[in-house]
Image: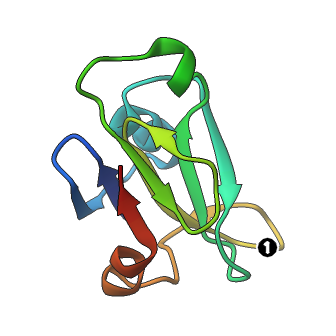
Amino acid sequence: MLVFVIDPATQRIDAVDIDDDLAGVRRLIGYDSVDADEIDANGDRLYFDESCFIRQVPGAGRFKLDSLAPVAGRGVVVGSDAATGALRAPQVTLEALAQRVRFL
């Protein structure tokens, strides 16, 4: 499954292929405690470290996606099926996502 990794430390957004759904998302973020916010009506969601500001990891960087609160550390954009909640590739394109992300 294709996902987009937002890495504020390198100020890059990369397409990554994973095959283990939420476990893969957690691995990409680097923590088991993840949370998600919906980013569009297509079911795309931004997953991030639930404790990103409590941890205060030096050098992790921060980013902002649209009007969501800033996120510290990596974020992963994944799609989800509205009926089943199953994870899938996001509907947003990498180019469109890049226009919506601001590195802080």
Report the residue that reaches farthest toward the front. Answer: 104
The answer to which of 71 and 78 lies nearer the viewer is 71
Query: Which residue is rendered at x = 69% and y = 73% of the image?
Result: 43
Residue 35 in the image, given as x and y percentages of width and height: 65, 38
Query: Which residue is rendered at x = 59% and y = 23% of the image?
Result: 33
Q: Is residue 48 left or right of residue 42?
A: left
Report the residue that reaches farthest toward the right. Answer: 83
Residue 104 in the image, given as x and y percentages of width and height: 35, 49
Report the residue that reaches farthest toward the left. Answer: 10
Residue 102 in the image, given as x and y percentages of width and height: 38, 63
Query: Which residue is rendered at x = 68% and y = 82% of the image?
Result: 42
Q: Quadrant of residue 93?
A: bottom left
Is disc 1 surrounded by few (<14), some (14 to 19) or many (20+) residues within 10 Å?
few
Whether residue 62 is situated above or below residue 60 in the rendered picture: below
The answer to which of 73 and 67 lies nearer the viewer is 67
Query: Which residue is rendered at x = 52% and y = 83% of the image?
Result: 91
Q: Quadrant of residue 38?
A: bottom right
Q: Is residue 46 left or right of residue 20?
A: right
Residue 90 in the image, given as x and y percentages of width and height: 50, 74
Residue wearing tag 1: 82
Amino acid type at image mark 1: Ala
Q: How many marks?
A: 1
Q: Quadrant of residue 40?
A: bottom right
Whether residue 1 is visible to the viewer of this picture, yes or no, is no
Q: Is residue 62 left or right of residue 88?
A: left
Whether residue 64 is visible to the viewer of this picture, yes or no, is yes
Badge 1 marks a residue whose secondary structure is: loop
The answer to which of 104 and 94 lies nearer the viewer is 104
Whether residue 40 is situated above or below residue 14 in the rendered picture: below
